[in-house]
Amino acid sequence: LGVRTLEDIPRTHFVTEYVGELISEYDKLCVPDGRYLIELVVNADNPDDSVYIYPDKFGNIAKFINHSCAPNCTAMLVNDGTARRIAIMTRKKIKAGEELTFKYSDSKEYFETYFRCVCNTKNCIINKM
């Protein structure tokens, strides 16, 4: 499906929150297919310290933002003082009509197991497998 913007969005601008159920490494094995499942590394010093967000039961427009290995947005873990949330932020200025994209995961296993990347960008993870 994909999501396109109707107006220009500046760099480092908040787009939306990625809403869904936070699930563990173990629980992700029960996900019937990889649709909408995203991985977010919580601790940059330990890439294995990840959370998975699955918006099957509840979610918003963010679940329709497509993956790209050369994204124009990024998913960031933010703390609003009461809870941790996933914010989708722009990485660069995005022009009206452009599709919004972000990188679902950096994990090779994720792309081998849950998601077949078809972004066809120069840096596509498929080219590195």
Image (cartoon, rainbow, N blue to C red):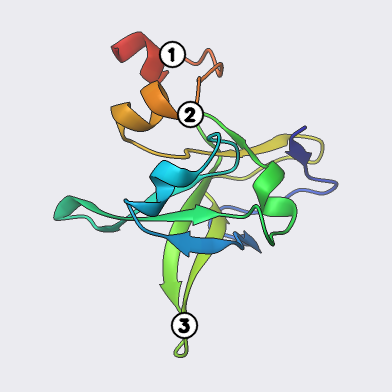
Quarter holding the N terminus is top right
Q: Position of residue 43 (x, y in %)?
A: 23, 60
Residue at point 75%, 40% (across, down):
3
> At numbered mark 1, what does the secondary structure look like: helix, strand or loop?
loop
The circle on residue 95 is: none
Is residue 46 found left or right of 104 in the rendered image?
left
Is residue 98 found left or right of 10 in the rendered image?
right
Amino acid at dot 2: Ala
Residue at point 62%, 45% (across, down):
93
Is 90 in front, or is 55?
55
The circle on residue 122 is: 1
Amino acid at dot 1: Lys
Q: Quadrant of residue 77?
A: bottom left
Q: Is residue 123 visible?
A: no
Asked if the residues shown at circle 1 and circle 2 are in contact, with their CB atoms under 8 angstroms apart, the answer is yes
Q: CA distance from mark 3 to mark 2?
A: 29 Å
In the orientation shown, which residue stands out farthest toward the right?
Answer: 6
Q: CA distance from mark 1 to mark 2?
A: 8 Å
Q: Position of residue 111 (x, y in %)?
A: 40, 26
Q: Is residue 46 above or below residue 21?
A: above
Is residue 7 found left or right of 34 in the rendered image?
right
Amino acid at dot 3: Ala
Q: CA distance from mark 3 to mark 1?
A: 36 Å
Q: Position of residue 99 (x, y in %)?
A: 71, 34
Residue at point 55%, 56% (across, down):
89
The circle on residue 83 is: 3
Q: Which residue is mark 2?
A: 70
Q: Local crowd at mark 2 within 10 Å, few (<14), some, or many (≥20)?
A: some
Q: Is residue 118 above or below residue 59?
A: above
